[in-house]
Every structure is written in C-alpha cells, then in structure tokens.
Image (tube, helix red, strand yellow):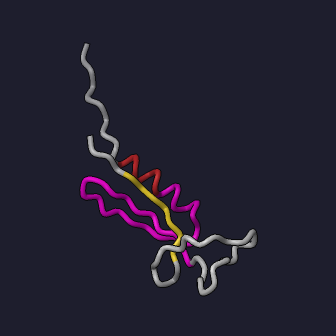
Amino acid sequence: MARYTSTIDPVHADGTVCSHRRTSTGKPTQPGCSGRHEFIATCTGNGCTWKKTDPQKTVLEVLRDQHLRSHVTMPAPTTC
C-alpha cells in the first residue's frame, strides 16, 4: 500500500517557506522577514502532485483531509 503524506506550511509572498517565530500578535521576530503571506498544502506519495494555497490554515486542513481520504482504497466486499 502506498504511503501519502500531506503538509501545510506558511509561505512568504515570494513562495519561500516562512519558518520564523512570531510574536503573540503574529508579527515576525526575524529581521527582514516579510511575514506569512498564505499557507500551502501539498501531498506527496506515489506520484501525487496535489497542491492548494489559501490565506487561512483551517481551510487547507479541511481540503487536505478530504484529499487524503481520496487515496483510501475501499476493501473488497465479502461474500458469505
């Protein structure tokens, strides 16, 4: 069975991952960091190229869960 992995990462406006710490108000603590522009969700495994972006992480969490369920194969029906 293939293994699929999905991640959600914050990204800057130029598309680079923003892994810098933030203050409680959401401002970046790293000098020169432009801040988080949006989030990107990606799925990897067995040739999957699914990718979505959204300014809200919670939206991507729902979409990611729906997408990962699409990879689940249903067991064959049993006959008695």
For the image, the number of numbered tags is 0
Q: Is residue 40 left or right of residue 23?
A: left
* Whether residue 16 is situated above or below residue 76 in the rendered picture: below
| Residue reaching furthest to the right | 25
What range of the chain is rendered magenta?
A: 37-63
Asked if residue 38 is positioned above or below residue 76 in the image, the reply reads below
In the rendered view, would you say 16 is above or below 41?
Answer: below
Drawn side of residue 62 relative to residue 42, left or right:
right
Taking the magenta stretch, the answer to whether it contains residue 53 is: yes
Place of residue 50 in the rendered image (x, y in percent of width and height, measured from the top left)? 35, 62
Q: Quadrant of residue 38?
A: bottom right
- Relative image position of residue 8 (x, y in whole percent): 49, 62
Direction from residue 62 to residue 43 in the image, left or right: left
The structure residue drawn at horizontal position 52% and vertical position 79%, both measured from the top left corner, is 12
**Quarter assignment of residue 7:** bottom left
Residue 6 at x, y percent in the picture: 42, 56
Q: Residue at x 32, y 46 (%)?
A: 3
